[in-house]
Structure formats: C-alpha cells, structure tokens
Amino acid sequence: MASLSSWLLLAALVAAAHYVLRLLHSFLWVPYLIERRLRRQGIGGPPRSLLSGNAADYRALLAAARSAPLASFHHSIVARATPQYTEWPARYGRPFVYWFGPRPRLVVSDPELVKTVMTDPTGAFDKAGTGGNNPLARQLLGEGLVGISGEKWARHRRVIAPAFNIERIKAWIPEIAATASSILDKWEVQGESRTEFEVDVHKEFHTLSADVISCVAFGSSYEEGKRIFQLQEEQMKLALLAMRTVYIPGFRFVPTKKNRTRKSLNKEIRSSMRKLIEINGRKCEDSKNLLGLMLSASKAGNEFKMGIEEIIDECKTFYFAGKETTANLLTWATLLLALHQEWQDKARDEVLQVCGRFEHPSPENLSNLKIVAMVIKETLRLYPPALFINRTTTRDVKLGKLDIPAGTRLDFPIIGIHHDCDVWGTDAEEFNPSRFADGKSYHLGAYFPFGIGPTICVGQNLAMVEAKVALAMTLQRFAFTVSSSYVHAPMMLMTLQPQYGAQVIVHKN
C-alpha cells in the first residue's frame, strides 16, 4: 500500500510539474520569442506584465477616456471611444503591439494590408471569434456565425445567407415600415398637445430594431422576445468584463457570484429561445425566414444539417447583433442630422419628392433615396457600430514587409481607419455625406463597417434597408434638433453607443 501511495504521489508530482512547465512555456517563453521577433522589425508597444500583459493598462485607458464627456458635439471621437488606437500609436508608432496575457494583438491600420488579410483565400488568417479563447467572453455570441470559423462557419453561412438576400429583404419592407410607423405614432401621441418634445432616440430605435429582427427573422414580436433582449443586455455587461481581463484556464468552473450569474443567464436565454422556436417554428418553415431556413436544415438528410443547439446559438447571435447594429446606426444618423440641419433638409426634401408626405417607402422607390443612403454611409464611417475587426494567423506569414508569427492576433481598427486624415483627407473628422455620392469610390480596406471579403456581415442588406426605411419615415413626419440635455459621450461597449442616451427635440412637420 505504501508503495502504491508513493507511485501515486510521484505521478501527481510529475503531472503538476508538466502542467507548470506548459504554463511557463505558454506564458513566458513563447511570448518572449514573439516579442523579440516583432521588436527586431521595429514594432513596439507598451511594456507588458509577464502574466497579464497590458490588460490593466487597457482598462485604465478606457476608464480615463470614459470619465468625462466631450466638451462639444464634434466627430473627433476615436480618443474617447477607443483610446488604445490614439494613445499607443502616438507613443510607439504604427503598427504597434499590445498583450492580453500571453497573447499579442498587433494593430495594423494600413488599408492595403487590411484588404489583403480580409480577402485572403489561403486560410492563413482565421477568425479570432468573439471573446477569443475566453469562454466567459464567448457566451454572448461565441457559438453563432460571428464567433465560429472553418467548416462549421461555412455550413452555417450556407444555411443563413439566403434569409438575407436583397430580394427577400425587399419583401419585408412593408413589415419594417409598419413597425417604424407604430413607433412614430407613439411619438405623435407623446407630443399631442405640444409643438415640440424630447425623445431619447437611442432607446426608441432599440425597440424598433428589436421588433424588426423578431418579426422578419423569427416570426415573432418584440414583446414575445422582450425578456430575451433584457437578459442579453445583462449578459453583454458580463461578457465585456471577461473580454477586458485575462482568462485563467478553468476559472469558469469556480462558483463566483459573477460565474453563477453567467450560468443562470445563459440557461434562461437558451430555454427562452427554445420555447420561442417551438411556438413559431411551424409558421416560420412556411415563410422561409431565418428561423424557417435553419429549421429546414435541421431535418434528417439535409446536407447542411443544423442541430437544435446550433439553431439556438444563431438565434442568440441575430437577436443581439440584429438589434444592436441597426439601433445604433439609426441613433447616430438621427443625431448627425439633428446637428447638421442643412443635410437634414436635403434628406427630407428627397424623401418628400420620392415618397410624398404620407406614403411609406416601398421596394420600388427605396433605391431612389440616394441622399438618405449617403447620410447612412457617412454615419457608418464616423460612428461605425463595430469598432474593430480581428484575425489570427494560423501559421508564420509575410504581410507586406511584416513577418508575423503564428498565433498573433491582428486587430484592424475600423474606427481609426475611418477617421484617418491620410486616408480620407483633411476633412476626415467632418460630417460630409457627399463623399459617398454616386461615382465616388474608396479603397476597399479603408471603409468596412460590415467587414469585407467572404466573412462580410450576412445581415448587412437588412441593416441598410431597415435604416433607410426608418430614417426616411422619421424625416417625413418630424424635424429634429439636438436637445440641450444631450451629452456627447460615444463609448465602446459591444458596439459604439452614446453613454448617456441620445436626446433630440422633435418638431412635428
């Protein structure tokens, strides 16, 4: 017995030593080699802690930037929303590298290199996925289309893409218009006895976009899915906390208060999604919307079969992303038009000419709203919903003059490139929709609010059509100015949002 105990003890010590050596190799030796290789190429960055990298520095930058609003309503917002893209390149040059634990993030702002990576067909650059290697950060979106890669991504994309082709989306325009009309009717009632009144458009457009994605993608309504949206808001806050810290392997199993909350939220969201699928499934199969297409793919014998858990993951993704992207786009577009009255007048004149005062936009005339489209594109340039996009090198790779080690995460700062005077000219920080007038072009890697290449956002068409319809209908019925209570404080959550709401003064036309 004593001999057996000795052998067991020895085996445990060997296993522990092996684990420690693996940790030392991953946390110390590999990062040292990568850092040395990058520094030899002149790539610098903030000094890193051996274990946590620059996670604490990153959080400190965000906290300092968020501590006070901008002094006035202007569009030089990069330093507040994403201070790492202004502070660190100013000190260390471009490109630069910073670290989360043992993992490097190489920030590359050259549009030509962005295009090269995002359109690469060789498999040298893989999607890093939402939350990367942190399972706590991945709970919000990690197993849906946004967070998966490889064969699984290709299979999901093949099933989902047909739900968002432009012809199908055009058929949804009457439903989108009806949803927008119901929101605007409430504004009319709110201001029934007044010529002007205040509206927080950020809150209102979140309700609108939640109702639209519920209706057109899942055959339900905002009220049916209201609890899911509320739970996802809570889940987002916890996912953000996880994204800004270094994950210790196995920590998700420690029963801390936050971990218990995460587990409870995830369980209730998945349970609610399952019930929603059961309630609306048969109706959706006939309509061939997103849920219907996924359910059809779940049937035996389908080449691109999706299991119920995969369908729930995609429902989670589109419930969240479908709401957030369009709601924030409409929020910033409305605020920009409230600030720049000359463009508001131009856009309204166009809407009245194309649609009249009382007719909703239709599939036939939506493409004639060219000024509205220019306003939306310029909004996406100045206030992109996603502030960066990333890829991870699957092997050692040459990128331009850069020699990049395998396992390096490449961060492309969408917001930084969109505001770069070297790319857009001296008026890069100004609101100028005419830069997107017909015939004017831009470099593919210089403007990518929805990504570029094979992984471009599958919901891009829906977001653009929904934004055009809702903005046009708002312009038909109301004029708006920036409220004196509005505080200009763009901040990065999962998307770019106004920290204190988006208050405008609405005037009936």
Image (cartoon, rainbow, N blue to C red):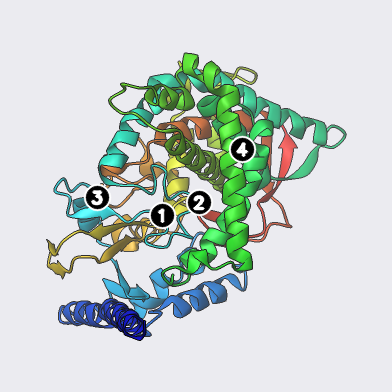
| Residue 145 x/y as whole percent | 38, 42
Dot 4 alpha-carbon crowd within 10 angstroms: few under 14, some 14 to 19, many 20 or more: some
> Does label 3 or label 2 sit earlier along the sequence?
3
Q: Which mark is residue 272?
A: 4
Q: Residue at x 51, y 20 (%)?
A: 284
Count of labels in the image: 4
- Residue marked by disc 3: 118
Where is 276 relative to 247, above or below?
A: above
> Does label 1 or label 4 sit earlier along the sequence?
1
- Residue marked by disc 2: 140
- Residue marked by disc 1: 130
- The amino acid type found where label 4 is placed reads Ser
Could you tell me if the residues under marks 1 and 2 are in contact, i.e. CB atoms within 8 Å? yes
Dot 3 alpha-carbon crowd within 10 angstroms: few under 14, some 14 to 19, many 20 or more: many
Q: Is residue 121 left or right of residue 462?
A: left
Residue at mark 3 to residue at mark 2: CA–CA distance: 24 Å
Kindly state the secondary structure of the residue where label 2 is placed: loop
